[in-house]
Image: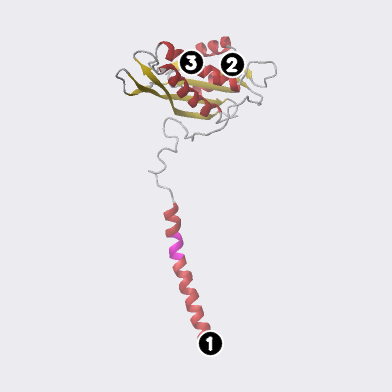
Amino acid sequence: MKNISKKIIAVLLATIFSIGAFALPAQAKNKEISSIDMIDKGVADTGEIHFTKNDKELVESKENYTVAVLPYVDVSGLEGRSREMAVNAVKETLKTKYPEKKSSTVKIASSNDVQKAMQKYPFENPEAPKLEELLAIGKACKADRVIFISNLPVREKETGFMLIAGTQTYSATVTMKLKCVDVTTGRYLFNQNLEGIGSSSSINFWRFGEPSKARAVKDGVTDCMKNFLTSFY
């Protein structure tokens, strides 16, 4: 009787193991992420890396390196006050992370050095420089990092109603091409197009109290720049 019981147990265990042997590969296969799901995660031909937005606070960098900030490229189509506010937002966020004071640990390459380097090593496409081109500029400036910033076309939208009085909202969807390379390691620290949305609302009476288009643009640019500058030290 004992021998029969042992045989039954042995058969059951063998059956369980055989089922598991077939089940495990199927489970492992099901856990694999498809190429469709990963379509926005790779580097493809552009070399762009996927980053998710974060809620980190933008603070002064305490690292020790020299950074070269390349001239701002603006193909946004913005004009007047909106264009001015966009540039100011870029400068303000950069100076928050890299304040110009004696106690700062990060050194900013001079505009003169950057201009000379760019004349010596011109970009094939000024709106989308390649990794090797940015590295050449960094080495020529004796910089540890190089930052490239471009403001792409802005999508604008105005909503609300107006008869004699009413409310109106202006929204601006800002897209920026942002790159930062580590010259020492020869790789990207950040290389992505980021999108930020800014808006401005007002209660209007006749022609008074219109929403500020420039403010909406500035908020969108600030959103992009904060996510960019908090993604690396």
Residue closest to the far left: 163
Which residue is found at the position 63% from the left and 15% from the top? 100
Q: Is residue 130 visible?
A: no
Q: Which mark is residue 141?
A: 2
Return the residue at label 1. 3
Depth check, front residue: 102 or 146: 102
Residue 15 location (% of width, % of height): 45, 73
Q: Is residue 52 magenta?
A: no
> For the residues marked 2 and 3, what is the alpha-carbon distance in whole angstroms?
23 Å
Residue 82 location (% of width, % of height): 43, 15
Depth check, front residue: 131 or 108: 108
- The amino acid on which the numbered mark 2 sits, given as a three-letter code, is Cys
> For the residues marked 1 and 3, what is the alpha-carbon distance in whole angstroms?
86 Å
Which residue is found at the position 53% from the left and 87% from the top? 3
> Do the numbered discs 2 and 3 sit on residues whose CB atoms are within 8 Å?
no
Q: Which mark is residue 156?
A: none
Residue 62 location (% of width, % of height): 66, 26
Label 2: how many residues lie within 10 Å, few (<14), some (14-19) or many (20+)?
Answer: many
- The amino acid on which the numbered mark 3 sits, given as a three-letter code, is Val
The stretch of residues the image draws in magenta is 21-25
Return the residue at label 3. 87
Is 24 placed left or right of 116 in the picture? left
Residue 232 versus residue 33 in the image, above or below: above
Depth check, front residue: 167 or 35: 167
